[in-house]
Each structure stands twice: as C-alpha cells, then as structure tokens.
Image: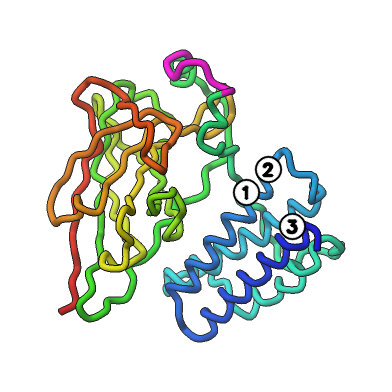
Amino acid sequence: MSDVNKTIQKWHASFRKGTDFDSWGQLVEAIDEYQILARQLQKEVQSTNSSDFTEEQKKTLGKIATCLEMRSGSLQCTQSKEEFKLEELKKLETIIQNILTYNKEFPFDVQPVPLRKILAPGEEENLELEEEEDAAAGAGSTEAFPPRAPGTLLPRLPSEPGMSLLTIKIEKIGLKDAGQCIDPYMTISVKDMNGVDLNPVQDTPVATRKEDTYIHFSVDVEIQRHVEKLPKGAAIFFEFKHYKPKKRFTSTKCFAFMEMDEIKPGPIVIELYKKPTDFKRKKLQLLTKKQLYLHLHQTLHKDS
C-alpha cells in the first residue's frame, strides 16, 4: 500500500473513532479526535512540498477540517446557533475515504479555515535573519491578511475519583518588543521526554491587551489528562507565536515549559527560551538576560 493510501486510511480511522465517540456521548474524546484530525488535514493543506494531493483535493481536505472544527464547536457550546450535526458530519466519511477520486460538489457551503503558513520549529530559521530586523517594519504594516482561526482551547475533562485535573491560567508574558507583536497567541502542548504529544495541542485566542513590556492573555487552559496519568519526565510547553506581515507567516518567537515537579497550586513564573522549540529540552538557550518571564497561575481540581 502506498504512503498516501496509508495516510488516507489513518485519517478515515481517526474520523470513525471521532464519530463513534460522538454517537456514544463521549464528547471530550470526540472533540479530541476531531481536533487532532482537523490539525492533520490542515497540515496537509499547508504542506508545500507534498505532491500527493492536487490543489482541488487539498481544498476539499481543508473544508473537511472546517466541518470537524464546526462539529467540535457545537459539542463545546450547546447554546450554539450554528449547530453542525453529527448526521451531517457523517456524510463526509466517504469523501475522506475516496479523496483521490472524489469529484462532486462538496455537500456543505463552507470554506477551508484561513490558516496562515505555520512553520515547523527550525524551518523558519532559514527564512529569517534576526527577529529585530522586521519588528519595526511589521509594526506599521497595513497589509490586509485573513483572520486567524479562533483559539482551539478545550473544556475541562470529567473528574475521576482520586485524580487531579490542572487548569493553567496564562496571565502575561514579558517581552522587550511586546507592543510590536502582531496577533500574538500561545500554543500549549504536553510532551513526553522524547518530545511526543501526550494530549491534543491547544491554541489560545489572540491576545488583545499589551502594555509596556507585557502581553496579557488572562486565559484558562485545561490540561487534557489527569495529573496522576502524566508520565515521568513529561513537560507542558508554551510556544509564543506572532504574525510577520513582511514574510506572511506565523512565527514562533520563544517558548517556555513546566516540568512535573513544578505542578502545584498558585502563581508560577517561568523562563523564556530562544526558538526553535526544543521539546526534548537538550539545548536550551535563554531568550534574554532581562527580567522577562511567562507568568502563570495553577489550579488543581481534585475529586475526593
């Protein structure tokens, strides 16, 4: 079986898993599955070096990703007027399975999520000189660009007896050029010691308040695994990203992380490191000697 067919098979299995969870009422698991699959499809749509799919097929994959996001949104917000039903989503199963030969009209009037180019850690190094060099140019740019997809923050998991859940409030980040960052947001991931994802990756909404050397987020992130189930050596990563109009892509500016022994209720201030994000935590370089950090507040919820 060719690689592309294996990929399609994997997507189809993930789609089935999500719709099964959805029909059984396991909504948290369904949302996870939908969001992971939507992200994989969007990655494929954005991939410039992949010739496995035509532009038309990529457009269809992008629309499927939009529908997955919409269904996921409907499950998270029961008051949503724009409800996207499970029956509707299920109509997309044959399209995923037959993406290489599908040539009919897409069944729903949706558009692919307008994602800017998001580069893998390290990829952007080749495209950039110093961060400083376009800070001034970026600040005054009036070029129109599409709005970013809204934050993909997930609801808190159901509690389990004797288990703890962690909410991390991202309060603010200190950066010397905070005022010049365009559309700043954070990507939060939980990785094992080899840098492998343990949970779905979450993005905060874009931060709108900046003052002096701070960008304020004031947003709660629910860690999608009970603390007791996190393996030894795991860490929670926070990647600070912003848009560069001159280069037309979203770039990681710096990152921070929290290890398991730092999980305790109350405020915590953690150091910022230079990109690219080093999920294995082997070659860490502090971003600055200045007293600028990521400010968080942790809350543990224990079901006794």
Query: In the rendered structure, which amino acid carries the disc numbered 2?
Result: Ser
**Is residue 63 visible to the viewer in this orientation of the structure?**
yes
The numbered disc on residue 230 is: none
Give the mark, 2 or 3, whose residue is nearer the N terminus. 2
Q: Residues within 10 Å of mark 2 (few under 14, many from 20)?
A: some
Tell me the distance, in whole angstroms, between the alpha carbons under discs 2 and 3.
14 Å
Callouts 1 and 2 close, C-beta under 8 Å:
yes
Lateral position of residue 13 relative to residue 28, left or right: right
Q: Quadrant of the C terminus?
A: bottom left
Q: Position of residue 114 (x, y in %)?
A: 61, 46
Tell me the distance, in whole angstroms, between the alpha carbons under discs 1 and 2.
6 Å
Q: Which residue is mark 1?
A: 43
Query: In the rendered structure, which amino acid carries the disc numbered 3?
Result: Thr
Relative to the observer, which residue lies in front, 185 or 40?
40
Q: Which residues are magenta?
A: 126-133
Q: Is residue 264 above or below residue 175?
A: below
Q: Which residue is mark 3?
A: 60
Q: Secondary structure at mark 1?
A: helix
Q: Is residue 155 above or below residue 111?
A: below
User: Image point 52% across, 79% down: which residue?
Assistant: 22
Instruction: Determine if the magenta segment contains residue 132.
Output: yes
Relative to the observer, which residue lies in front, 218 or 39?
39
Residue 71 occupies which quadrant of the picture? bottom right
User: Image point 23% across, 44% down: which residue?
Assistant: 171
Q: Residues within 10 Å of mark 3 (few under 14, many from 20)?
A: many
